[in-house]
Amino acid sequence: MILQMGLGGRMSQITLTRLAVPIIAMLFFVSLVVWYFYKKLEEKIDSQKVNEKPKQFAIKLLGGTEKEVIRLLVSMDYVGLQSDISRKINKLKVHRAVKSLSQKGIVEVLPKGRTKLLKIKKEFRELLRADP
């Protein structure tokens, strides 16, 4: 197949095979460069995961309100009332966060009158104390 191009009023003919070879070579080179940098980035992410401290990793797994509830419980010596936390954060958000933390096995929930007593479980408490 022949491609016709106008250059300065003249018509020149360039075969598609002459254009295809450099374009394919360029695409191959670009894909190699992208693959190389992707592998480097992947290695960097993997090394960060290995070097990450357990406390930082555990905290990253928690949602925003869950982190706030844990932070407040830590400031209360790892035990506190849900009603006290609800004074600082929306009640519904606290309820959902406590339910989620309880399902994840991070917080123990005990009934206490009309409210609930929240305790950070021993395993997670030790994890929080392990790293400054």
Image: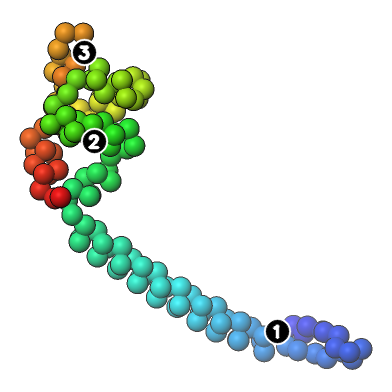
Image: 85 above or below 18 = above
Q: Is residue 79 visible?
A: yes
Tell me the number on the disc at residue 16: 1
Label 3 vs label 1, nearer the camera: 3
Q: Earlier in the sequence, mark 3 or mark 1?
A: 1
Tell me the number on the disc at residue 115: 3
Residue assigned mark 2: 71
Label 2 vs label 3, nearer the camera: 2
- Amino acid type of disc 1? Leu
Q: Is residue 95 visible?
A: no
- Amino acid type of disc 2? Arg
- The CA span between labels 1 and 2 is 66 Å
- The CA span between labels 2 and 3 is 19 Å
Q: Residue at x 86, y 85 (%)?
A: 6
Give residue 71's quadrant in the image. Answer: top left
In front: 89, or 95? Answer: 89
In front: 4, or 38? Answer: 38
Tell me the number on the disc at residue 47: none
State the SS at label 3. Answer: strand
Q: Residue at x 85, y 88 (%)?
A: 7
